[in-house]
Amino acid sequence: MYRESENDMSIDFKLSGFDEFEKTLVDMIEVKYPEEVKKILYELADELREKAKEKTPVGTRKYFYSGGRKRKIRKSSRLRNSWKVGRVRQKNGEFFIEMYNNAPHAHLIEDGHRIIGKDGSDHGWWEGKHMLLISTKQLEERLEPRLQAWLNEMLEELSL
């Protein structure tokens, strides 16, 4: 699931695609080994953060004008370095973790925005980079086999 607020973007994971037996086992593991669930959620969130950072553009402006003077600037990595992973939380019996970017312009780069001139004229649409959305889809493609391997590992530990 993808959720956005004004100043940050965040994403929540919800595990699905398991049959009833596997779901029962996952529920048992969540109750018996909550630290293991937290560990895998942190691993997934860190992987997602790294993927999003790779896809996040870095500023390319070489100059800006201030007080009528042309001033040199370096490439800005503020957006790329603003990806954060929150804490694992539990609500209504479900574990979740939030990943977000608190840069004030993150939602504009992710989703795109209208280009408005100083006189208020509309100059079109700047298409977003969708770095979080693309990274999430890539992670979801590899998620089921990874969770299946984790579940098998936990079953071996439980000797089931």
Image (spheres, rainbow, N blue to C red):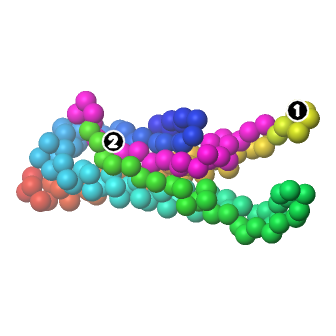
The residue sitting at the left extreme is 159
> Image height check: is 141 above or below 93?
below
> Image height check: is 136 above or below 91?
below
Magenta stretch: includes residue 100: yes
Q: Amino acid under label 2?
A: Phe
- Provide residue 16's location: percent of width, then percent of height: 35, 38
Nearer-N-terminus badge (2/1): 2
Whether residue 58 sits left or right of residue 88 in the image: it is: right
Residue ID for mark 2: 96
- Provide residue 34's location: percent of width, then percent of height: 18, 48
Residue at figure coordinates x 82%, y 40% from the top left: 115
Give residue 149's mark. Answer: none
Residue ID for mark 1: 120
Foreground tag (2 vs 1) = 1
The residue sitting at the front extreme is 67
Residue at figure coordinates x 73%, y 69% from the top left: 74
- Return the residue nearer the eye: 138 or 87: 87
- Provide residue 102's location: percent of width, then percent of height: 54, 48
Distance Cα–Cα, label 2 vs label 1: 42 Å
- Return the residue nearer the eye: 117 or 133: 117
Circle 1 — which element?
A: loop
Whether residue 78 sits left or right of residue 44 in the image: it is: right
- Residue range (magenta): 91-114
Dot 1 crowding, Cα within 10 Å, few <14, some 14–19, many 20+: few
Residue at figure coordinates x 61%, y 46% from the top left: 104
Whether residue 131 sits left or right of residue 46 in the image: it is: right
